[in-house]
Image (spheres, rainbow, N blue to C red):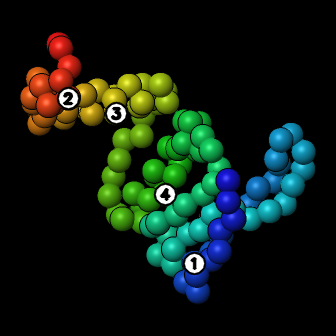
Amino acid sequence: MGKTILGPKAEPAFRVIRRSGKIASSLDGALDQNGLVFGTYLHGIFDTPPLRENIIAYLASKKRIRVNTGDTSIEQVWENGLNQIVSAVKENLEISRIFDLLGCNQ
């Protein structure tokens, strides 16, 4: 929840045309002057594969790089991300030492 106040070098990122099933017309978020950084209050915007893939393709084209967006479900994206976090924690933290410091039994 919030309202974006645009700076002098930003423009709205999105136009909302439907809100809660009703026709709407409001601007949301911000896009920087280079078109590489944007933000929005739209919850779940990356949960829809076609929209997520188009945003990634747009950003990749602006950076002149190639990406394979594939057809991965949001659930698989989340699971892959969580697995990366778990691996990083296991590799970089001494969990047993943390438990000792907290006085927890393993």
Q: Please report the residue visible at 18 percent of the width from the left and 35 percent of the height from the top.
A: 88
N-term-proximal mark, 2 vs 1: 1
N-term-proximal mark, 4 vs 3: 4
N-term-proximal mark, 2 vs 3: 3
Residue 95 visible in this rendered orientation of the protein: no
- Would you name the residue on which mark 4 appears? 58
**x then y, percent, for residue 55:** 52, 52
- Would you name the residue on which mark 3 appears? 81
**x then y, percent, for residue 57:** 46, 52
> Please, which residue is most extreme toward the right here?
22
Callout 3: few (<14), some (14-19), or many (20+) C-alpha neighbours within 10 Å? Answer: few
N-term-proximal mark, 1 vs 4: 1
Residue type marked 4: Tyr
Callout 2: few (<14), some (14-19), or many (20+) C-alpha neighbours within 10 Å? Answer: few
- Would you name the residue on which mark 1 appears? 10
Q: Please report the residue visible at 34 percent of the width from the left and 29 percent of the height from the top.
A: 82
Residue type marked 1: Ala
